[in-house]
Image (cartoon, rainbow, N blue to C red):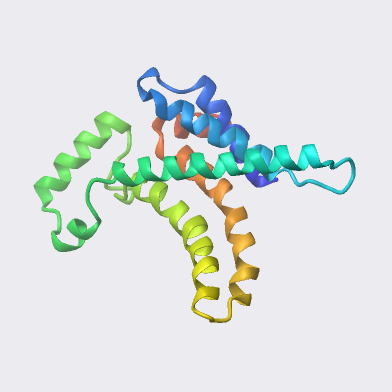
Amino acid sequence: VLGIALCAFLLYCLIFRTRQDLGIYRYLQRIITAEGMFAMIPTSSFGVTKEVLCLYLAVYNLTWVMIDYNFLYRLWAVKSFASVYYLFTPTTSGRLTMREETLKEYGIDTTSHVMIMGDYFLAIIPLIFLYCPCGMMILLPLTRLDSSWMARATPLLISCFLPLDALAVLLSMTEYRQELMRIIR
C-alpha cells in the first residue's frame, strides 16, 4: 500500500510538477512508475486466464527492461565514485562557497543538511534491491552453494525496490520535494 501511494504521488509529480528541461528522463520515469504500480497489484486465482497472465508477465518484463535502462542512466549520471569525498576534506571557504551555491540553486542549506548527492541513492537502490539479489539467485546455485536463504529474501528485497525508488526520486528532485512538503503541511 505504501509503495502504491508513493508511486502514485511520484506519477502525479511527474505529470504535473516537472520542469520541461528533464526531457526523455521524465517520460522514462513515468513509464517505470506506472508499470511498477501495475506490477505491484497482486494477481489472484479469480479470473486469471492465460491471456491475463501473459499480459501481466509482459508488462512486468517490460518494467525490468525499463529499470535496466534507468539504472544505467543513473549510474552514468554519477560521474565519479565517492572516493573523492573520503580522500579530500572540504575547507571552510569551500564549504561556504558550496553552501551559497546550493542555497541559491536548490534551496538547501548544506550546514544543516547532510551533503550527499541524490544520484548515489538513485543508483544504489536498484543495485541493492534488484541486481544483487537476482544476481545471487543466479550465481549461488551455479556454485552449488545453499541459496534457500536468498530465495526467501529475494522477493522481499524486490518488493521494497519500487517504494524506495519512488521515495529517492521524490526526495532528490527539488520540485517534487517542495510539493511533498506543501502537501504534508
102 vs 136, left or right, is left
Q: Is residue 184 visible?
A: no
Q: Residue at x 58, y 56 (%)?
A: 158
Residue 130, percent from left and from top: 51, 56
Find the residue positioned furthest to the right. Answer: 46
Residue 68, percent from left and from top: 46, 45
**In this view of the protein, which residue sits in the foreground, 158 or 69?**
69
Find the residue positioned furthest to the bottom. Answer: 145
91 vs 175, left or right, is left
How many numbered discs, if any? 0
Residue 94, percent from left and from top: 12, 46
Residue 105 occupies quadrant? top left
Q: Is residue 112 visible?
A: yes
The C terminus: image quadrant: top right
Residue 107 occupies quadrant? top left
Q: Residue at x 20, y 34 (%)?
A: 101
- The answer to whether residue 123 is above or below residue 173 is below
Residue 114, percent from left and from top: 32, 51
46 vs 115, left or right, is right
Q: Residue at x 15, y 59 (%)?
A: 89
Q: Residue at x 13, y 59 (%)?
A: 88
The N terminus: image quadrant: top right
**In this view of the protein, which residue sits in the foreground, 70 or 106?**
70
- The answer to whether residue 65 is above or below residue 11 is below
**In this view of the protein, which residue sits in the foreground, 8 or 143?**
143
Residue 24 occupies quadrant? top left
